[in-house]
Image (cartoon, coloured by chain):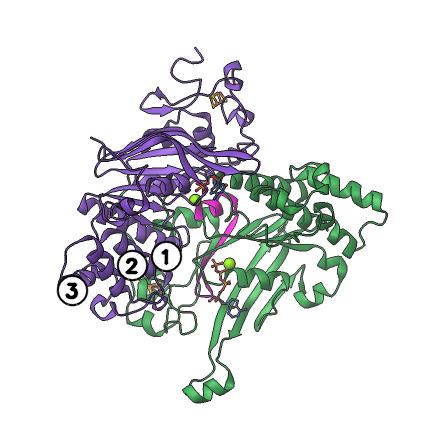
Amino acid sequence: MSQQPRIVFEAIEASRSFDVSKGPLQRVLSGEGRRILRAVDSVSFGISHASTLSLVGESGCGKSTMARLAVGLYRPTGGEVRFEGQNLSAARAQPALRRKMNMIFQDPYASLNPRWRVRDIVAEPIRAFKLLQGPKDINDRVGQLLTQVGLSAKDGEKFPHEFSGGQRQRISIARALSSEPEFLVCDEPTSALDVSVQAQILNLMRDLQNRYGLTYLFISHNLAVVRHMSDRLGVMYLGRIVEQGPAEAIFRTPRHPYTRLLLEAIPDISSVGRRRTPVGGEVPSPIAPPPGCTFHPRCSLANERCRTEKPEHTRNDDVLVACHAVQEGRAV
Amino acid sequence: MALLDVIDLVVEFPTRRGTLRALDGISFSIEPGEILGVVGESGAGKSLTGSAIIGLLEPPGRVASGQIQFEGSRIDRLSPAQMRPIRGRQIGAIFQDPLTTLDPLMSVGRQLVETMQTHLKLSDRDARARAVQWLEEVGIPAAAERVEAYPHQFSGGMRQRVVIALALCAEPKLVIADEPTTALDVSIQSQIISLLKRLTESHGTSVMLVTHDMGVIAETCDRVAVMYAGRIAEIGPVADVVRTPSHPYTEGLMGSIPSLEARVERLRQIDGAMPRLGAIPQGCAFNPRCGRTIARCFTHRPDLMPAGATQAACWLVGGGAA
Ligand SMILES: Nc1ncnc2c1ncn2[C@@H]1O[C@H](COP(=O)(O)OP(=O)(O)OP(=O)(O)O)[C@@H](O)[C@H]1O
Ligand SMILES: Nc1ncnc2c1ncn2[C@@H]1O[C@H](COP(=O)(O)OP(=O)(O)O)[C@@H](O)[C@H]1O
Ligand code: SF4
Ligand code: SF4
Ligand SMILES: [Mg+2]
Ligand SMILES: [Mg+2]
């Protein structure tokens, strides 16, 4: 019997709402009530050690909000987020656990301080967590980190603007690795990069995972990238996960109508000359989401129940799907 | 006769430290009704090629040599006043960000009417009726009620639909679409691309579709040009370029794209980066990253040569390596 891998990260019915009301005076004048935007709405998933779980979905569905919840940049307004079996706030209060999680952002330029030399950018977490003391030890470690991500130790002397987009993302990765993390949250790490540079970064992330047993929460709107990277997959729509399970199972047989729509919408290089039926509709406003299943205005399988009753998750093999049609066996 | 002929086009930017050559001898043509895709890494020269064709190169950028012919007549030497009636009427443009094309202070209906009346002889009434028709055609629901709406009242996808209507409403023969869906969501992207394809097909419009998304190219275009460091590395029918590329760069590029169909352990990776302008190596610009170089790659620059169904700028094709 193989041992169950340990769960490194877990979200348990995690929610995050934002108050997007107008100011109190304007509210009185316009007679409008408070407006609450549920960016992440009761989301549950776990990520086991040395594996990758990806979240996909269209803009505004709550991916980045979930990423920020996962590293403690936002506190949940409902439910719980856990790291290494502890509530995240408790975990983050302990430097020994806090340094084990880190984040890589989409825009490798905005996330690097332009006035710092690369060696100071990379060394910052080492100093903050007092992982090494003497300047020589820190310098050696920075050189080692830069080499690991495919740059050279000499690049430490330069400033971020002297690098290309792909090289800057390597610098962000070197910095993220410098606190020797176990868990990395990667929010669209290659979305700003060209495909050839993307391949370099994705390969690097894979190599690092194999070498150091890293656990990834990976976020992207690009399903082909996600397929390449993930062990497990969560498909988000308007703040909720509508389908989740082993990535291969979902790509092989997508069940939720929204997952199918997403897969159908994506042009692929293997489909030269393919004729597609374009999918209709746009994502509704998350401030006043449709009642029942929030996907019903765009769903060809929607019926009366879908318009009134929110679908719960039901298990099909190892895949969780929140859809009445799937549950009723209408989605074939 | 081809609709558009670009012949040995060179675009340069004079700078204090010398002249930067951003496009270095580009040749291709677009047939009537054809969709030509243009792909390549950022900085390869895709947008500059488009700007040069519509006569919107930002100074000090200039066409240093070569020709651009539209229906057989040169358009690269025209004054701004001579170019204005061609832009819009003969050649339409769609850019990545709809807000750069739309006037925020004018209703979308007004913008359509003005564009049509600038180029076509239409009464106010006819122009207004056509504006509604165009909004319907690009899929704006309740078009008749929304002609008076302003751009900010539309979502990003809707705005890009309006931009397409604006680009097509004067019935140009060629549309240059520079990353028209890059700023949009995946499901909206496919709606917009299908729309563009359907409309240009039904109006017989040619399209130069610039994108870095090979998937979009594969599904939409007849032919594709792959650009690298200001040159065309390979050009040919989409199926051939995607499935049996001849240029080592195209081959690397195709291998680096994750596919929905087949999962691979490791993506194929082209090490290194595209050279910056002003630091382009002698010989073939791809030589520092190429795994198949021969002596000539470092001394002589390859031009496009026939390579099976495509043309590739590489010494390994056309008997170069034999
Ligand atoms: N600080 C905030 N205040 C108010 N609303 C917010 C805040 N952060 C996010 N939102 C809203 O929450 C929703 C989810 O946003 P989020 O950034 O998580 O989306 P996303 O899935 O990452 O989208 P994208 O693909 O565009 O990055 C959006 O409607 C967004 O406008
Ligand atoms: N105004 C300008 N001044 C100097 N160089 C420019 C200017 N515009 C573009 N370039 C350079 O020309 C090259 C091609 O640019 P562009 O056509 O925008 O690339 P692409 O659209 O393929 O990303 C790049 O190296 C870019 O830096
Ligand atoms: S619950 Fe109903 S509306 Fe929602 S996805 Fe399923 S079938 Fe469609
Ligand atoms: S010409 Fe030489 S360097 Fe250039 S792509 Fe061909 S083999 Fe490689
Ligand atoms: Mg985001
Ligand atoms: Mg461009």
Along the line of sight, the residue nearer the viewer: A75 or A247: A75
Q: Is mark 3 within 8 Å of ligand 6?
A: no
Callout 2 touching callout 1 (CB < 8 Å) = yes
Is residue B62 visible from the viewing direction of this image?
Answer: yes
Colour of the chain lettered B: purple
Q: Position of residue B233 (x, y in %)?
A: 42, 28
Left or right of residue B133, residue A319 in this image: right
Q: Position of residue A148 (x, y in %)?
A: 68, 38
Residue that carries the numbered disc 3 in the rendered image: B124
- Tag 1: residue type? Pro
Mark nearest the camera among 3 and 1 is: 3
Please say if A159 is above or below A329. above
- Tag 3: residue type? Asp
- Tag 2: residue type? Val
Along the line of sight, the residue nearer the viewer: B165 or A213: B165
Q: Position of residue B287 (x, y in %)?
A: 53, 24
10 Å neighbourhood of mark 2: few (<14), some, or many (≥20)? many
Where are the magenta residues, as a range?
Answer: A223-243
B288 is within the stretch colored magenta: no
Rendered-image quadrant of the N terminus of chain B: top left
Disc assigned to residue B98: 1
Write the residue at 34% across / 38% down: B37
Q: Name, please, the residue furthest toward the top.
A: B322
Q: Quadrant of residue B36?
A: top left
Disc assigned to residue B162: 2
Please say if B79 is above or below A74. above
10 Å neighbourhood of mark 3: few (<14), some, or many (≥20)? few
Q: Secondary structure at mark 1?
A: helix
